[in-house]
Amino acid sequence: MAKMVKIGELKNHLSAYLRKVRQGQEVIIADRETPIGRLIPFTAAKKETEFKIIEPAKGYEGLKSLSF
């Protein structure tokens, strides 16, 4: 479960909250009572990325022939 923390509390105890994030927890940052951001654990991207092929929009049919 995510913990909500106000900016001042986060500044005063940043190391402790970063430790929680390293352990897999999410921290919601609030300006007074309004959520403005979140700290989440970093996950490395998978080596193989799957791309979904979709039909081009009308007028862009020529883009089908492009390859990456």
Image: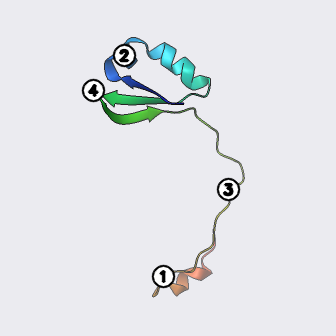
Q: Residue at x 62, y 23 (%)?
A: 23
Tell me the element at label 1: loop
Outermost residue on the left side: it is 32
- 3D distance between C-alphas at marks 4 and 2: 11 Å
Q: Position of residue 26 (x, y in %)?
A: 52, 30
Contact between marks 3 and 1 (CB within 8 A): the answer is: no
The quadrant of the image that shows the C terminus is: bottom right
Q: Hey, what amino acid is under mark 3?
A: Thr
On the picture, is 13 further left or further right than 21? Answer: left
Q: Nearer the viewer, mark 2 or mark 3?
A: 2
Q: Residue at x 49, y 14 (%)?
A: 15
Q: Position of residue 21 (x, y in %)?
A: 55, 25
Which residue lies under the disc numbered 4? 32
Which residue lies under the disc numbered 1? 57
Q: Residue at x 44, y 34 (%)?
A: 38
Q: Nearer the viewer, mark 2 or mark 1?
A: 2
Which comes before the other along the chain, label 4 or label 3?
Answer: 4
Q: Hey, what amino acid is under mark 4?
A: Arg
Q: Residue at x 43, y 12 (%)?
A: 13
Tell me the element at label 3: loop
Which residue lies under the disc numbered 2? 9
Which comes before the other along the chain, label 2 or label 1?
Answer: 2
Q: Residues within 10 Å of mark 3 (few under 14, many from 20)?
A: few
Which comes before the other along the chain, label 2 or label 3?
Answer: 2
Which comes before the other along the chain, label 4 or label 2?
Answer: 2
Which comes before the other along the chain, label 3 or label 1?
Answer: 3
The quadrant of the image that shows the N terminus is: top right
